[in-house]
Image (spheres, rainbow, N blue to C red):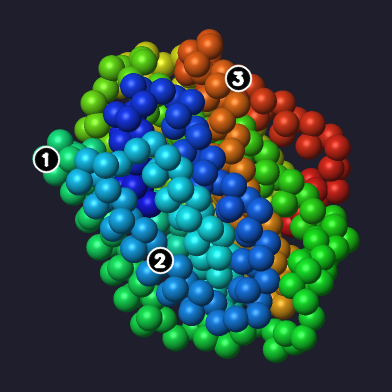
Amino acid sequence: MAIGMQQITRGWLVLRLTSDSPFALSLVMMSFALPLTFVSVLGGVFADRISRRQIILITQSGNAILTFLLATLDMTGIICFWHLLVIGFCNGTLAAFNMPSRQSIISDIVPVETLMNAISLSSAGMNLTRIIGPALAGVLIVYLDTAGVFYLIAFIHAFSAICTGMIKAGMIPATSNSRKGMATDIREGFLYAAGNPTLLGLIIMGFVPALFGFPYLNLLPAWGREVLNIQSDGLGLLMAFVGIGSLIGALFLASICYLKRRGIFLMANGFVWGIVLIAFSRCNSYTTALPALLLIGFLSAIFMSLNMTLMQFYSSPEMRGRILSMAMMTFGIMPLSAVPFGALAESIGTADSLKFSGLLLCLSIIVFFFAFRRFRKVA
């Protein structure tokens, strides 16, 4: 809920401070993405060495404090663009430690045969709040302004930390061998992934949509202003439809008892995602844009949940945190990839920039299909 609300509220604040600049939106997201990209491997080591529950608890509390500070800066009127960059960097650092533990703790709770269903249900829970969060934030900005919404987001982060304290799993570290240095653990994780063709393929497949499939999320506020002339409530509606599609996709995957030829399925899903993204770039009304966003959310949720499931399935318990930290690096790449597309949008328009990202996604999937023939046999 907090993430969905903050994405809308922060994006709207950036537009207000920078006269509707899509490039400024990309820069703020980049400040979040840099530590998420480069610190996640360290977060993976911590997830294998330290109580995963404790890591989640500390990082969620930190997010509450940072968002409260952002709200206060906004309310007092002294907020500057650079404040958003600094706080975004701190949020990204906390996420780099939070996300590997948050994902790998699922395998501490459920048996391996229900892992895909559990990860999909977890994704469904997050996507449910992505439906409510953006729409709620869009409406509340009208009445509470961005500062009031940021205070509400800080409270939600604090509530999340309290709920984390109720979890009993993940209290014991996955490995008791902490004599090795951090650098050794990180190197072992990369060597382990490089030596397993399936894991290597899954990591690459995680980076492909991060580079070309997700930049639309960061450019959606600018696209909405250019094409539909939306206000904050309209932006919340667009993001809500992405969330609805993601929820449906996650629940669809959670309902499947057994999925055959998951490697082929993953690649086909990514290719169709690119096609729909190209179609969305040509939309010029709510009537066509909302169904396209619904389908994009559906496809992206299936892709990410299935990719995360296969990573946990094919990795050993003592390496799981480090392997998932590599997957978390893709979450950092997502906002970073929006920077060149944001710069491109400044010159050719946001719609054409989104079309180009969809074309690159399709092309990358085709190249991967022929270059990694063994991946087609992933069960």
The residue lying at 52 percent from left, 86 percent from top is: 171
Along the line of sight, the residue nearer the viewer: 247 or 260? 247
The residue lying at 49 percent from left, 78 percent from top is: 53
Which residue does the numbered mark 2 point to in the structure image?
A: 62
Of the image marks 2 and 3, the number of the one nearer the N terminus? 2
Q: CA distance from mark 1 to mark 2?
A: 27 Å
Could you tell me which secondary element the residue under label 2 belongs to?
helix
Can residue 251 be seen here?
Answer: no
The quadrant in which residue 243 appears is top left
User: Foreground mark, 1 or 2?
Assistant: 2
Do callouts 2 and 3 mark residues in contact (Cβ within 8 Å)?
no
- Spot occupied by residue 370 in the image (x, y as percentages of width and height): 84, 34
Do callouts 1 and 2 mark residues in contact (Cβ within 8 Å)?
no
* Mark 2 residue type: Gly
Which residue does the numbered mark 3 point to in the structure image?
A: 356
Of the image marks 1 and 2, the number of the one nearer the N terminus? 2
The residue lying at 24 percent from left, 31 percent from top is: 232
The quadrant in which residue 47 appears is bottom right
| Quadrant containing the N terminus in the rendered view | bottom left
Could you tell me which secondary element the residue under label 3 belongs to?
helix
